[in-house]
Image (spheres, rainbow, N blue to C red):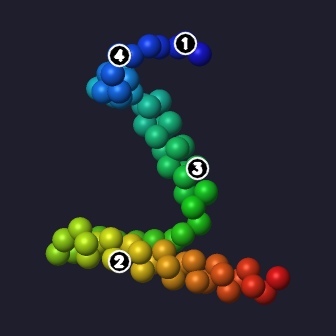
Amino acid sequence: MPIFKYKTFEEAERAFWNFHPDESYFKKVAELWNFANKLSTIQYPKGIFKFKNLKESNKHREKIELEYALKKRKTLRKF
């Protein structure tokens, strides 16, 4: 694997951009998302949700994650 030197963080960040993705790029992205889904077992509800602002959206996500954590906690206490 080659090593690259960059003068700024922005320059290094731009090196990751892909302006002409091909089919293999999209396959790699799909594999990455599948792997991430396996790591995180939280099941978010399917569908499109409409929120008035970002605060409301974050509150909704936090509620789902809290419910998941409480459910996970109950199952772990059984052991």
- Where is residue 41 shown, x and y percent of the image? 59, 66
Cα gap from disc 3 to disc 2, whole angstroms: 24 Å
Residue 30 visible, this orientation: yes
Residue behind mark 4: 7
Q: Is label 3 in contact with label 2 (beta carbons under 8 Å)?
A: no
**Mark 1 element type:** loop
Answer few, some or many: residues within 10 Å of disc 4's Cα (few below 14, many 20 plus, some between 14 and 19). few
Foreground pick, 44 / 72: 72
Based on the displayed image, in which of its 4 quarters is residue 71 positioned? bottom right
User: Is residue 31 rendered to the left or right of residue 14?
Assistant: right
Residue behind mark 2: 60
Kindly identify the amino acid type of the residue bearing the numbered disc 1: Pro
Sooner in the amino-acid sequence: mark 3 or mark 1: 1
**Mark 3 element type:** helix
Kindly identify the amino acid type of the residue bearing the numbered disc 4: Lys
Residue behind mark 1: 2
Residue name at image x 66 percent, y 81 percent: 73
Cα gap from disc 3 to disc 1, whole angstroms: 25 Å
Kindly identify the amino acid type of the residue bearing the numbered disc 3: Phe
Sooner in the amino-acid sequence: mark 3 or mark 2: 3
Q: Is label 4 in contact with label 2 (beta carbons under 8 Å)?
A: no
Kindly identify the amino acid type of the residue bearing the numbered disc 2: His
Task: Pick out the residue farthest to the left.
Answer: 52
On screen, residue 27 above or below 55 = above
Residue name at image x 35 percent, y 77 percent: 60
Residue 35 tag number: 3
User: Is residue 33 rendered to the left or right of residue 53?
Assistant: right
